[in-house]
Image: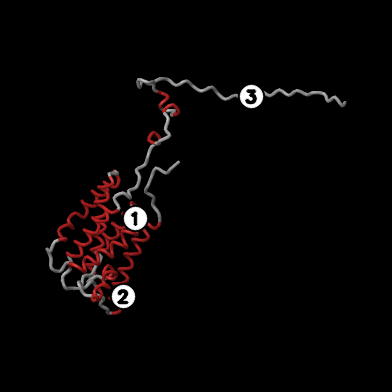
Amino acid sequence: MKDRNPFKFSTRVIGYPLLFVLLIWTVFWVEIRFGLDFNYLGIRPREIVGLRGVLLSPFIHADIKHLFNNSIPLLILSLALFYFYRELSWKILIYGILLTGILTWLIGRPANHIGASGLIYLLASFLFFKGIFSKFYRLMALSFIVVFSYGGMMWFVMPVDPSISWEGHLSGFVVGLVFSFIYKKEIVEPPKYEWEQPDYSEENDLFMQHFDADGNFVERKEEPEYQEPEYHYIFKKSEEE
């Protein structure tokens, strides 16, 4: 029988998000430990050398507050991505980082844009809109959890604070929305019960046999108990004797 639960927990659901968060903390520790500053490796809009930040910027943070504020939502949202959309998870992460970074490079102000916040906005946007499009109650519930938990982030897709890369936030939000349309048809199939199967037959359903054609409950006749057949052995004398 096909598993009715399309969502399965595995070690990668928590392992990959933890590994990613651990990696960005390790990068920050290296900066502190050896007195380095990786900010220059961020996205520098419309400069060829600034394209390296498309891949590197999500791992670079300005200070411990910046890193801490990004770590928790990144962990939670990536956990949700790997659990509810395990088949799409790597596509969303890899293509999302690339497209979010490139869009930031195109529209950003002349500065070093760093941090994983663009990826966070990508995940929040994708999880919200994909759940709404799915029309599957669990994924729609996830959408409402995302909007209730992180709906306040919407303020920061606008230039409300000059020290924040709102261009990166906006880029992540737009890319997440686009991905929810692109992968609109790749939605997990809701579980089907026995009566929803194409080969279902009411006549063979033990429960439905308790009701007549008008829907009235009727006492079902008990099946006769199985009785072992009686065997009779006949011995015939051989003609050669």
How many other residues sit within 10 Å of disc 1, few (<14), some (14-19) or many (≥20)? some
**Nearest the camera: 237 or 49?**
49
- Side of 23 relative to 237 (left or right): left
Badge 2 marks a residue whose secondary structure is helix
Give the quarter of the figure containing the C terminus: top right
Q: Write down the residue under mark 2.
A: 30
Badge 1 marks a residue whose secondary structure is loop
Badge 3 marks a residue whose secondary structure is loop
Residue at 21%, 75% in the rendered image? 47
Disc 3 from disc 2: Cα separation: 81 Å
Give the quarter of the figure containing the N terminus: top left
User: Where 226 falls versus 163 (above or below)?
Assistant: above
Comparing marks 3 and 2, which lies closer to the viewer? 3
Number of the label disc, if any, that sits on residue 212: none
Give the amino acid at mark 2.
Val
Q: Write down the residue under mark 1.
A: 88
Q: Write down the residue under mark 3.
A: 229
Q: How is the image coloured?
A: secondary structure
User: Where 224 falls versus 41 (above or below)?
Assistant: above
Residue 209 position, x and y percent, is: 42, 24
Residue at 15%, 70% in the rendered image? 109
